[in-house]
Image (spheres, rainbow, N blue to C red):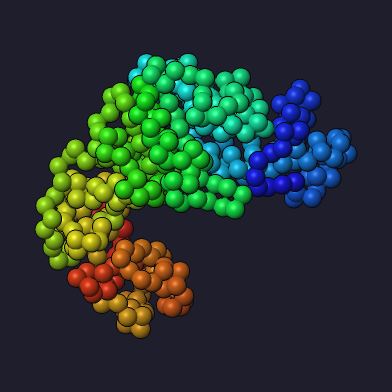
Amino acid sequence: MPQTGYVDIARARFLVSAAGRAALAEAPDEWNELPLHTLAGRLRLHLPAVEAAAVGEQIALQQRAGPALWRPRLLLTAEGLQMATHPAVARRRAKRLAELSLPVADLTAGLGCDLWACIEAGMPALGVERDPATALLAASNTEGCVVRGDATRAPVDPQRSALIIDPSRRTDSGRRFDPAAFSPPWGVVIEMARAAAAAVVKGPPGISHAAIPLDCEVEFVQFGRGMREAALWFGAEIRPGLKRAVLLPGGDSITSAETESTDETSAPQQFIFDPESCVTRAGLVRHLAHQLGATLMDPKIAYLTAPAPTASPLAACFEVLDALPFAVGRLKTRLRERGWRPDEVRRRGFPVEPDELRRLLGRLDGEPVTLLCTTICDRRMVFIARQWRPGEEL
């Protein structure tokens, strides 16, 4: 049962057939927990080998997707699952697209995750997918709203549509990091977006800021602790040059239109704030600093400091218990003397990986603390801290 790459066309045709759907529907829920070889054996008692492999792969992929699966019994590929948009991200995008009152065309539909969110939101929507097997599965997933085709020659009028474009960043040899090597190439995608009434281009969250055009609005979207994407918006209802950090599932955000702090720095104070990744990727640390009444400790480091705590979903707040110049022996002695155990290690501008620092410190017992490791004015420092949460006494 292959676990990588695209599903082949024969398997796709079987899975979308009445027989394939029946085989999936009749699979007992307890089969989800079976090892692959056991699952394959059970299925071959009822199905030919090729069909058994197709059903077994779907059960395994749906189990891997877990609660992030946005529809039950969704037809998947391993490649498509890796690239699938999280439901919360897709629904937020669909809500914004719905406000434009335009038909939506997802030109790189994949398995149809973004497209289904648009259909749920009540928009007329069409998807285009170039891979024939994936297009079959996506059409089944979206009740027939996906056709096979090329994003660059899609059967829609871009001047009357809102486009979704997610250029492929994967090949059989691995992930591509150069936007010029995406498919379609980044430059082609940007020109397609500019020609539409409205468009959103999905890029990797780590995309170079140099690759982001000045005439778009960009959102750096995070779900939980993980970055999901950089979404570039063009056309209707956008503010060119605006940057936005978005944290889901709560929907909290901050933009470059908000007031930012000065570039002044201050010595570490009683509280340190660690901004979420979406804030740092969007370059909005000083904007968040103004909201928090905080300042930078070093112009190159995103940690912020203030004399008092402030609650914000966009930054974790820590009360400093101790601080010392970094040296493994000194840090280990201090932790043991105070009865502290490093439960979490965070770092910014610091050369030692958290797991490596834990290994160097060895086993320590005591009250759990967080180590904030950083560099201030070219000095490596460690702040031993306790996370503060609203409602806690100081």
Location of residue 67 (image quadrant) = top right
Give x and y (percent) for residue 113: 53, 31
Q: Is residue 234 visible?
A: yes
Q: Quadrant of the C terminus?
A: bottom left
Q: Residue at x 62, y 34 (%)?
A: 131
235 versus 335 height, above or below: above
Q: Picture coordinates of residue 154 (x, y %)?
A: 51, 24
The quadrant where residue 64 appears? top right
Q: Which residue occupies the foreground of this view, 226 or 51? A: 51
Q: Please state if 378 lies on the left or on the right of 213 as rendered.
A: left
Along the line of sight, the residue nearer the viewer: 380 or 340: 380
| Residue 372 in sight in this render | no
Give residue 359's position: percent from left, percent from top. 46, 75
- In the image, residue 111 above or below residue 358: above
User: Residue 380 at what x, y percent from top left?
Assistant: 27, 74
Q: Report the number of discs.
A: 0
Left or right of 31, for residue 123: left
Foreground residue among 284 and 171: 171
Q: Report the residue at 59% width, 39% height from top.
A: 80
Q: Residue at x 79, y 25 (%)?
A: 19
> In the image, what residue occupies the spot 80% across and 48% down?
38
**With 118 as the anchor, is 11 left or right in this view?**
right
Relative side of 134 to 251, left or right: right
Classify 134 as above or below 101. below
On screen, residue 372 above or below 134: below
